[in-house]
């Protein structure tokens, strides 16, 4: 096969891959609200964070999670026990995916898929931290391993405050294996890697063929 024809094959396969390209929405499909007073102990503030389960219909398919924040710690206060949303404490650069979740790499704040899980986590004494949200838009079953909507939100202290929180930025990947926290980059499919490696080897072999 000529190099020109080989390149055509690569282009065709790349086109096929791009037809299933990721849908990533930046700074739009995660909402943040609060603080709401009245929580205990004293000086505890409740916040709500919600994620759109549909990239297009972002206003009609939200799932919300409420948590309390006090003294650099967060803990769940209220969430919906349906398809809902699961909340995690993540770090910039983390691979936030079902695999990372189910293999215990990501600390869990709370899971609507298992209301019995409710953890109090220390977020660090910086002026910011990251939350990860995982959800889906389906008829179930609602399990951590079936999630295909992954988002992150950077939460910071409000200017001039050592207590009140605001959301600085966020991104959500839809119908994907996961997202890299702090970026709009999705977690690649294993099939994509398996495709690229043989093609790279093949093109190298084509280039080495002697001209006749």
Image: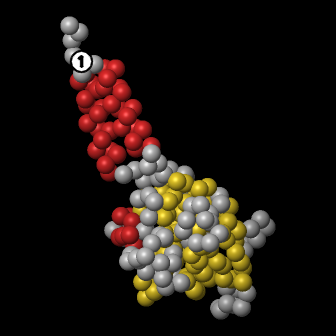
Residue 61 x %, y %? 58, 72
- Say which residue appears at 37% left-offset and 34% top-offset: 12
Q: Nearer the viewer, residue 124 or 84?
A: 84
Give the vertical position of 182 relative to 71 (above or below).
Answer: above
Residue 49 lies, with reference to residue 206, above or below; the image says below
Secondary structure category for the residue under label 1: helix
Residue 112, image x and y in percent? Answer: 47, 81
Residue furthest to the right: 160
Q: Residue at x 32, y 38 (%)?
A: 196
Q: Which residue is mark 1?
A: 208
Residue 88 in view = no
Q: Position of residue 159 (x, y in %)?
A: 77, 65
* Residue nearest the viewer, comparing 113 with 89: 113
Tally of numbered discs: 1
Q: Is residue 206 left or right of residue 22?
A: left
Q: Quadrant of the N terminus?
A: top left
Quadrant position of residue 145 = bottom left
The answer to whether 121 appears left or right of 206 in the picture is right
Name the side, left or right, on which 163 lies relative to 1: right
Q: Residues within 10 Å of mark 1 (few under 14, many from 20)?
A: few
- Res 182 → quadrant: bottom right
Which residue in the rendered view is the most extreme toward the top?
212
User: Does the rendering let one see residue 172?
Assistant: yes
Quadrant (top left/top right/bottom left/bottom right) for the C terminus: top left
Identity of the residue drawn at 51% across and 58% down: 173
């Amino acid at each position: 096969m000529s190099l020109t024809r080989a390149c055509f094959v690569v282009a065709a396969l790349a086109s096929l891959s791009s037809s299933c390209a990721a849908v990533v929405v930046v700074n739009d499909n995660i909402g943040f609200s609060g603080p709401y007073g009245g929580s205990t102990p004293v000086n505890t503030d409740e916040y709500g964070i919600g994620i759109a389960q549909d990239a297009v219909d972002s206003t009609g398919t939200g799932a919300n999670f409420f948590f309390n924040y006090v003294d650099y710690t967060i803990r769940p206060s209220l969430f919906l026990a349906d398809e809902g949303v699961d909340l995690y404490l993540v770090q910039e650069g983390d691979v936030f995916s079902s695999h990372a979740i189910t293999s215990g790499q990501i600390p869990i704040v709370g899971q609507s898929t298992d209301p019995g899980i409710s953890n109090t986590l220390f977020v660090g004494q910086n002026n910011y931290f990251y939350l990860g949200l995982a959800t889906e838009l389906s008829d179930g079953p609602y399990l951590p391993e079936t999630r295909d909507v992954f988002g992150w939100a950077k939460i910071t202290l409000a200017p001039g405050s050592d207590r009140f929180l605001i959301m600085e930025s966020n991104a959500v990947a839809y119908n994907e294996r996961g997202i890299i926290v702090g970026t709009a980059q999705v977690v690649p499919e294993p099939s994509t890697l398996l495709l690229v490696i043989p093609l790279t080897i093949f093109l190298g072999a084509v280039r080495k063929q002697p001209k006749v």
